[in-house]
Image (cartoon, rainbow, N blue to C red):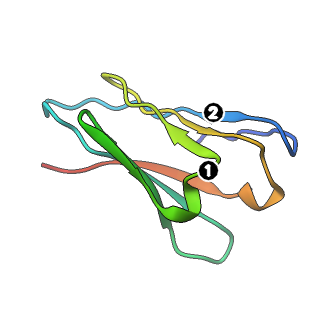
Amino acid sequence: TNEKTTANEGQQVTINCEFKTLQRTPYLYWYIQRSNSLPEYMLMRYKLGSSNSSEYEDRFDARLDSNSVPLTIKNLRVSDSAVYYCALQPT
């Protein structure tokens, strides 16, 4: 769903992502797309682990639940203004 989130610099924000799957071990990905740029990989979560792109290690986190993987961004910066996508890896 398209959801607009607004917050101030220095604040924390959480962007929701809900999914449905029959996979036992779903892999969920978050991507960021800044103006006039291609989507860029940020992080991946699955039941047994996680990984973050080095650029997104400090202030970005996501917690995988049974049907959601909300993205939390801490200490917001103006440069965080972008479109964020979550994706479920196809089987």
Residue at disc 2, secondary structure: strand
**Image location of residue 88, percent across then percent down:** 30, 45
Q: Residues within 10 Å of mark 2 (few under 14, many from 20)?
A: some
Looking at marks 1 and 2 on the same chain, the residue that comes earlier in the sequence is marked by 2
Q: Is residue 47 left or right of residue 15?
A: left
Q: Nearer the viewer, mark 1 or mark 2?
A: 1
Label 1 sits on residue: 58
Q: Amino acid at mark 2?
A: Thr
**Image location of residue 83, percent across then percent down:** 61, 56
Q: Is residue 62 left or right of residue 51?
A: right
- Do residues under tags 1 and 2 come within 8 Å of each other at their CB atoms? no
Query: Can you name the residue that lies furthest to the top here?
Result: 66
Q: Residues within 10 Å of mark 1 (few under 14, many from 20)?
A: few
Residue at disc 1, secondary structure: loop
The residue at the point 26 percent across, 44 percent down is 27
Residue 58 drawn above or below residue 70: below
Foreground of the two, 76 or 90: 76
**Image location of residue 42, percent across then percent down:** 49, 58
The residue at the point 23 percent across, 36 percent down is 48
The residue at the point 50 percent across, 68 percent down is 39
Q: Amino acid at mark 1?
A: Asp
The residue at the point 50 percent across, 32 percent down is 70
Foreground of the two, 25 or 55: 55
Residue 1 visible? The answer is no
Q: Is residue 21 left or right of residue 4?
A: left
Residue 67 visible? The answer is yes
Quarter occupied by residue 64 = top left
Label 2 sits on residue: 14
Q: How many marks?
A: 2
